[in-house]
Image (cartoon, rainbow, N blue to C red):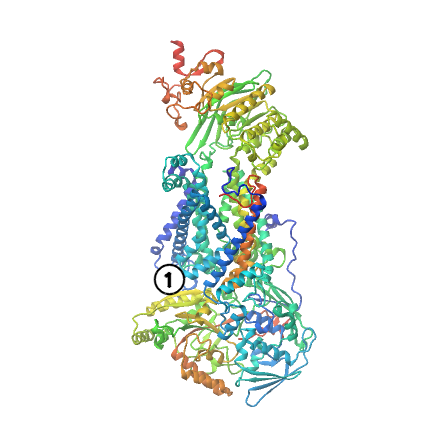
């Protein structure tokens, strides 16, 4: 269990001041990520306009059009300036489409897929984890623990191929791929949910075992509380804390799209664009999606901290986390 | 599966979904609507800026140029109802028919002139600008419906070019009103082809409907067409097998075994040569400047075994121009009719014979070894070590490993493979930052010139940096000639010279297949340019 | 940790270890098991199914898949081990320094980690693959570039914790250098969670390598890791399934074995578990069948008759309580005194039915108001409408749910035990707060436990227990975690409750001075047995058992009430509970031990007023 005094705390300052500090910190992180991405993309050889049919003359024209002929520092400041106006620029490869537009197209799809997967993962993860933790050392625990270990041991592309083959192709229960209609969402969501579900189950099991050793559970048992109240208010409520910490980054990962799953199941989400844009050297799209991802992640971490504060009265501070 | 098991399965897996979704089921295909696939989403509904074959496949169905390429690769009338060609074959005058844009505005000569001018303008930065600028000298609007195009030199395949996306018309008023956003959605453009775009669900599908203002709408039999974006090859065939698609333009290589012997599998013309290019300007690789070395490297490959057992989707290549490119007329393959020695190779899948002219034979290992030793002596090198730049694709990885193995085994050449992304490979080859590379070239138009003029001195696509005055002279002569018989002779000489010098080593010609059910008729497949027009297609239940 | 015993104790651990050793051996020996070379291309033998010549079949280029699979396993495992070890090294170094030095360095470290976490690692790995060229080396560097972070965070947390431990503080006070302390005192103590993390990092690295191979960033051709083979096989898996499923099975089962190994190790090494997990020997545990209800009038509040508690552990049977009999009357405070490990807490918990469900064997009789209690009882105790037991634990913070307001914890007990409505329960809770001496009851009601002082928390715990209107209160070291002044006030409160409510109190303590000051009667527990008992006045004036005597002698007389000096301190150390003698367990430390003390059970010798002791020496002294 976490000790009462947390490691890092901005003590003696008001919550508004702490919020301000946190926001500054978040912006700094974003700036570092943006700069790193900018430099990183320029370090990778390759060229967004290296099409076999592009003559040097045409390439020069394209460079001029997109401002790539300017010195690097000028490009950098222009890029930062645009970022500050939330303008990620125009894609070099997907003609005429702005990066904002591509994100606006792809993200809702990835987010929807992610949310279904999240629901599945929470349901199965909590169920398995709770069963394993509460029936510790029994057959249920062993089966649930094995399932969870299996879940973190099978890479998603193998799972995706397997599910697609068995459930869609052989049994015909679901469409093979696509994003049309409710049933099409099922297999990608299921595949995407396995790893987080298994992780949640493992975390929750460990956490429940930890909580069960605490004296306050004995106190609660002595009180003669009803099963549900004991389970929900005393065991799960406290065991959930460790899961919440994991949930923040996981939600961002799962909702910004998985390249593998979106490709295999042909889902028009953001994950597909992300890897593709790196391959295409589509500078603006890579930078836009990276910064977008980082921003989401940072906000999610912030929300996790707030949620943590709400769930755990011992932590009532913006950002200062321990361990 | 028994009811019980199935019910349990659903119950268990869908528990968290209860009460929270009732999304639309996939609609049943509407009668008269063809559902087919595109391997990636289209980029933009703007012919002047499009470069990829996927976008071309949609564009050819929603726009109409001065001409159109029809069944068998023949030129058929498009917006131009009459074409006059001057005696020197450099001036073409087009007389436009009364055709309308989908918003009811008539298609005018100025629409073509504006489109061509825009593509030629460096500020537009159109990637396909060269296909216009290399050929077209000037465009004049002679009347509302009269257009004259003056060429830089006689170009036998010019009427084929006028069907190419870069030559398609464009409405100046719309472009100026919409600016950057022109063509980014169906509402932000107009059409003049057999179909119009009813919906573009980005990343998922493009829905076409018959254009009721099309000048030749009686010829169009389909009510509409859908192009579903399917990137994964497994998904593609599963969708086909489960009836979600009724046409696959190009069956993925990996799934060809599945359709071997299937009568619906149709070979379709494809004009792509896969070849090895050697960098002739590496000071540290003097050996590459010796034709004997390059020839030896070419001779040790077992092209026939590779095509039959590994690739299963190609014909071995002993010349540079693929067999699907026409020679002196439509249906007259250059490869089959012009050359010195001929052999017949069979399509590994359908056993269809291809008569092809060859300039050398492979598996002449002893000859290769001797040549290699001579070459090494001449270039003063003791051994040869180099890196082969390949694409990061499964096919290229396989070929790379086969090349690596044969070169090492027979010639003792040490090769490291450098798989890079497509964009990186193109950039590194263009800047001559490589030793040797495995590259492909696909035809831009249906003429041997599109392959053979690559290696003239100063050509922007001369990857090896090859420079041979005799070769340059032959190609230049062919360019200026308007006599097909003379051109063919010149091309044969040029190709023979190219194979003797071997700055590039052809490996195979790609074959490809479409899956066309018997109830679908009239889909036109083309080797190059905008493939797959559905203008004449029909579904007969 | 006794290795062989651990292996025997966990078949899962043994199985996963054996499996991994098997995989490793095959990966190492692979090249000698097949006549083929992994790189020999044979264009006439492509895509052959598994058979005699090629046990795993051949791939698209006619290469033997058996040798390629094991060669691939070797590369994958090498990448996994190398990446995990580098992660470990970096994590130990950076996390250790950040945690140990703390301050600005630590803050900077945490900030840097936060930034690093926000960069998608695919981009980092891609960047490196391009800059360093593809290869095993750049793969490992790319993976460790962000991979060390979780390890460093873990180490930092463990170091922060270890830094506060007594032995580290002592070493610091003795003037040892920081690196020496880090190396010799802190690192050995953080190793077990780190070891667990390591076993779980290896599969993660192997997993990541497979993923990177899938998106085209694997080892250089023609070499192939398992990830490369899977990627190659996945393409045509419907037609040549063995090309996918053989390497996929090897990969998944290896990962599963590693994860299982890590999980089992974590369970075994987890310091929070204290003792190794008790495991059941007999199904259903020993429960004494209920006796027919007797007349309860006049019976003592609590009677234990020959109560025994044994735990089943991987080391064998652990007798925690051995034939303890005692009685407690209403309105009486009985102090149960003993060293830590003497079994006094176990006794308290066993009366409450709070022992682990599995692995505890309980026998003997426990009568509460003349009614038999079935031990151990499971789940929440159903106490509705029955005479009640209540128990207070040593650490008041740990006894309260940290995420629930203090008042609510009292109120919910009232709702459950007395069927009150929530509004009535709240009123009653405020009354109870007043009764246990809380000044600002309303503020306290809405406070979370961590916001209260130690004494206040313990008062809240008392309020929770009083909410049950118990007849018997077991107070397990209720004042140990508190300062001296608060101790006295809490004990005064207990005494008050004893008289006002007629509570019977079983006061468990290791502090003789407290027992002497507050208890009516005292029982001295040694190694799970009662060695002496009696009214506290008598027992302290005239201690009989050599153990009691030794303890009382060790209390400095002038200020015997000072708890710091009144701690039980006796020459020698408590006995090993697994190897107790048949006779008196105190024999090895006893100044007056007879030769036969070790082998024969000592007899009870009864003195006056219920004062009795269990010792040969006492018996002989009386009858001589």
Residue that protrudes farthest toward the bottom in the picture = B87
On screen, residue B134 versus residue B541, left or right, reads left
Q: Position of residue C291 (x, y in %)?
A: 56, 22
Q: How many marks?
A: 1
> Against C609, is C241 above or below?
below
Q: Position of residue C429 (x, y in %)?
A: 63, 29
> Against A101, is A23 above or below?
above
Q: What is the chain identity of the residue bearing mark 1?
A: C
On screen, residue C31 versus residue B238, left or right, reads left
Q: Position of residue A42 (x, y in %)?
A: 47, 63
Residue that protrudes farthest toward the top in the picture = C624
B125 or B97: nearer the viewer: B125
On screen, residue B65 versus residue C33, left or right, reads right
**What is the crowding at mark 1: few (fewer than 14 residues within 10 Å), some, or many (at least 20)?**
some
**Does residue B102 appear in the picture of this structure?**
yes
Quadrant in the picture for the N terminus of chain C: top left
**Does residue C305 appear in the picture of this structure?**
no
C609 or A178: nearer the viewer: C609
B99 or C299: nearer the viewer: B99
Residue C5 is drawn in which quadrant? top left
Quadrant in the picture for the C terminus of chain C: top left
B482 or A190: nearer the viewer: B482
Residue that protrudes farthest toward the right in the picture = B104
Q: Position of residue B237 (x, y in %)?
A: 55, 63
Kind of element beneath mark 1: loop
> Against C604, is A58 above or below?
below
Q: Where is mark 1, residue-wise?
A: C39
């Amino acid at each position: 269990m976490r000790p009462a005094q947390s490691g890092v705390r901005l003590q003696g300052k008001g919550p508004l001041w702490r919020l301000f500090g946190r926001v500054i910190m978040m912006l700094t992180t974003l700036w570092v990520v943006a700069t790193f991405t900018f430099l990183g993309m320029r370090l990778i050889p390759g060229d967004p306009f290296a099409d076999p049919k592009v003559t040097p003359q045409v390439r020069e024209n394209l460079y001029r059009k997109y401002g790539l002929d300017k010195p690097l520092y000028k490009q950098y400041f222009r890029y930062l300036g645009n970022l500050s106006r939330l303008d990620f620029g125009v894609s070099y490869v997907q003609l005429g489409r702005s990066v904002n537009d591509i994100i606006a197209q792809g993200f809702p799809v990835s987010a929807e897929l992610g949310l279904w997967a999240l629901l599945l993962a929470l349901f199965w993860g909590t169920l398995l984890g709770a069963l394993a933790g509460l029936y510790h050392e029994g057959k249920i625990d062993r089966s649930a623990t094995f399932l969870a270990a299996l879940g973190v041991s099978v890479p998603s592309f193998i799972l995706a191929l397997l599910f697609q083959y068995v459930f869609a192709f052989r049994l015909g229960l679901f469409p093979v791929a696509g994003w049309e209609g409710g049933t099409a969402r099922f297999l990608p969501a299921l595949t995407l949910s396995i790893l987080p579900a298994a992780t949640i189950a493992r975390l929750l099991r460990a956490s429940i075992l930890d909580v069960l050793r605490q004296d306050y559970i004995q106190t609660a048992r002595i009180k003669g509380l009803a099963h549900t109240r004991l389970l929900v208010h005393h065991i799960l409520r406290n065991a959930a804390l460790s899961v919440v910490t994991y949930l923040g980054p996981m939600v961002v990962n799962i909702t910004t799209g998985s390249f593998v799953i979106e490709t295999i199941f042909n889902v028009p989400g953001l994950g597909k664009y992300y890897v593709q844009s790196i391959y295409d050297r589509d500078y603006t799209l890579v930078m836009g999606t990276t910064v977008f991802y980082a921003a989401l992640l940072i906000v999610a971490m912030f929300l996790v901290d707030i949620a943590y504060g709400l769930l755990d009265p011992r932590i009532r501070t913006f950002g200062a986390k321990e361990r | 599966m028994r009811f019980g098991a199935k019910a349990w399965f659903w119950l268990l897996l869908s528990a968290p979904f209860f009460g929270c979704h009732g999304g639309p089921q996939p609609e049943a295909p509407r009668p008269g609507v063809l559902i087919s696939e595109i391997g990636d989403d289209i980029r933009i509904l703007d012919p002047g800026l499009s470069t990829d074959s996927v976008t071309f496949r949609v564009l050819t169905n929603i726009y109409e140029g001065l001409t159109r390429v029809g069944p068998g690769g023949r030129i058929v009338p498009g917006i131009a109802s009459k074409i006059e060609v001057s005696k020197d074959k450099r001036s073409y005058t087009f007389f436009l028919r009364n055709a309308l844009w989908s918003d009811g505005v008539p298609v005018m000569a100025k629409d073509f002139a504006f489109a061509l001018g825009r593509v030629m303008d460096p500020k537009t930065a159109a990637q396909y600008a060269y296909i216009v600028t290399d050929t077209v000298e000037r465009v004049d609007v002679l009347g509302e419906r009269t257009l004259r195009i003056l060429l830089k030199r006689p170009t036998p395949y010019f009427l084929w070019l006028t069907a190419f996306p870069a030559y398609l018309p464009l409405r100046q008023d719309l472009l100026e009103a919409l600016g950057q956003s022109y063509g980014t959605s169906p509402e932000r453009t107009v059409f003049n082809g057999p179909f119009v775009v009813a919906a573009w669900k980005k990343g998922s599908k493009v829905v076409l409907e018959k254009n009721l203002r099309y000048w030749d709408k009686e010829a169009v039999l389909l009510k509409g067409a859908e192009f579903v974006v399917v990137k994964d090859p497994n998904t593609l065939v599963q969708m086909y097998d489960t009836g979600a698609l009724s046409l696959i333009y190009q069956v993925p290589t990996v799934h060809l075994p599945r359709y071997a012997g299937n009568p619906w599998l149709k070979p379709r013309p494809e004009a792509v040569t896969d070849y090895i290019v050697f960098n002739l300007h590496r000071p540290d690789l003097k050996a590459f400047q010796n034709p004997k070395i390059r020839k030896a490297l070419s001779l040790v490959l077992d092209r026939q075994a590779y095509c039959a057992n590994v690739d299963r989707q190609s014909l071995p290549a002993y010349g540079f121009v693929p067999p699907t490119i026409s020679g002196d007329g439509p249906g007259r393959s250059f490869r089959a009719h012009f050359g010195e020695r001929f052999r017949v190779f069979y399509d590994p899948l359908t056993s269809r014979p291809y008569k092809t002219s060859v300039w050398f034979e492979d598996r002449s290992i002893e000859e290769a070894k001797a040549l290699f030793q001579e070459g090494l002596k001449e270039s003063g090198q003791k051994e040869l070590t180099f890196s082969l730049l390949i694409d990061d694709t499964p096919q290229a990885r396989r070929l790379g490993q086969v090349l690596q193995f044969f070169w090492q085994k027979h010639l003792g050449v040490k090769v490291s493979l450098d798989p890079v992304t497509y964009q990186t490979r193109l950039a590194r080859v263009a800047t001559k930052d490589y030793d040797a590379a495995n590259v492909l070239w696909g035809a831009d138009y249906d003429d041997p010139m599109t392959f053979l003029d690559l290696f003239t001195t100063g050509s922007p696509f001369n990857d090896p940096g090859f420079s041979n005055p005799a070769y340059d002279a032959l190609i230049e002569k062919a360019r200026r000639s308007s006599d097909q018989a003379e051109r063919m002779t010149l091309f044969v000489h040029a190709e023979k010279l190219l194979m003797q010098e071997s700055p590039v080593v052809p490996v195979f010609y790609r074959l490809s297949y479409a899956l066309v059910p018997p109830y679908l008729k009239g889909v036109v497949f083309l080797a190059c340019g905008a493939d797959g027009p559905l203008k004449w297609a029909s579904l007969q239940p | 940790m006794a290795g062989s015993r651990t292996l025997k104790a966990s078949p899962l651990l043994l199985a996963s270890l054996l499996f991994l050793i098997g995989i490793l051996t095959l990966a190492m020996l692979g090249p000698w098991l097949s006549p083929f070379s992994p790189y020999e291309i044979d264009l006439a033998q492509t895509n052959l199914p598994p058979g005699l010549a090629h046990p795993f079949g051949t791939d698209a280029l006619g290469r033997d898949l058996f040798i390629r699979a094991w060669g691939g396993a070797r590369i994958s495992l090498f990448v996994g081990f190398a990446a995990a070890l580098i992660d470990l090294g970096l994590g130990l170094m950076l996390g250790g320094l950040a945690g140990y030095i703390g301050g600005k360095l630590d803050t900077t470290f945490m900030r840097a980690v936060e930034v690093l976490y926000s960069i998608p690692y695919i981009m980092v790995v891609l960047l490196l693959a391009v800059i360093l060229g593809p290869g095993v080396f750049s793969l490992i560097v790319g993976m460790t570039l962000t991979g060390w972070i979780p390890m460093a965070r873990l180490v930092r947390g463990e170091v922060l914790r270890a830094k506060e431990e007594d032995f580290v503080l002592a070493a610091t006070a003795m003037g040892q250098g920081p690196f020496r302390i880090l190396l010799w005192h802190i690192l050995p103590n953080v190793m077990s969670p780190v070891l667990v993390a390591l076993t779980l990092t290896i599969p993660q690295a192997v997993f990541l390598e497979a993923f990177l191979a899938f998106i085209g960033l694997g080892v250089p051709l023609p070499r192939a890791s398992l990830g490369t083979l899977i990627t190659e096989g996945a393409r045509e898996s419907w037609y040549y399934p063995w090309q996918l499923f053989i390497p996929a099975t090897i990969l998944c089962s290896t990962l599963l074995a590693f994860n299982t190994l890590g999980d089992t190790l974590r369970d075994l090494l987890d310091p929070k578990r204290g003792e190794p997990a008790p495991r059941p020997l007999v199904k259903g545990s020993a429960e004494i069948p209920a006796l027919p209800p007797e007349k309860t009038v006049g019976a003592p509040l609590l009677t234990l008759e020959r109560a025994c508690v044994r735990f089943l552990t991987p080391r064998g049977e652990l007798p925690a309580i051995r034939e303890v009999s005692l009685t407690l009357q209403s309105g009486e405070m009985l102090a149960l005194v003993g060293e830590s490990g003497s079994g006094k807490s176990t006794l308290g918990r066993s009366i409450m039915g709070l022992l682990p469900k599995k692995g505890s064997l309980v026998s003997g009789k426990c009568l509460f108001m003349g009614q038999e209690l079935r031990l151990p009882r499971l789940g929440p105790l159903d106490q509705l409408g029955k005479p009640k037991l209540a128990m207070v634990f040593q650490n008041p913070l740990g006894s309260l749910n940290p995420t629930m307001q203090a008042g609510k914890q009292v109120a919910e007990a009232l709702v459950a035990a007395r069927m009150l409505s929530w509004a009535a329960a709240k009123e009653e809770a405020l009354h109870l707060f007043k009764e246990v001496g809380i000044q600002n009851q309303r503020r306290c009601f809405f406070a979370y436990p961590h916001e209260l002082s130690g004494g206040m928390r313990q008062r809240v715990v008392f309020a929770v227990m009083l909410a049950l209107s118990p007849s018997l209160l077991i107070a397990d070291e209720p004042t140990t975690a508190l300062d001296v002044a608060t101790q006295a006030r809490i004990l005064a409160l207990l005494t008050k409750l004893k008289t006002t409510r007629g509570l019977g109190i079983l006061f468990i303590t290791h502090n003789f001075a407290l027992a002497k000051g507050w208890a009516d009667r005292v029982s001295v527990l040694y190694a799970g047995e009662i060695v002496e008992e009696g009214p506290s006045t008598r027992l302290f004036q005239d201690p009989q058992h050599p153990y009691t005597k030794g303890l009382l002698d060790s209390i400095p007389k002038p200020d015997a009430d000072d708890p710091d000096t009144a701690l039980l301190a006796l020459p020698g150390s408590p006995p090993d509970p697994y190897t107790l003698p048949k006779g008196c367990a105190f024999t090895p430390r006893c100044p007056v031990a007879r030769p036969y003390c070790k082998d024969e059970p000592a007899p009870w010798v009864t003195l006056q007023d219920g004062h009795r002791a269990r010792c040969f020496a006492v018996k002989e002294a009386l009858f001589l």
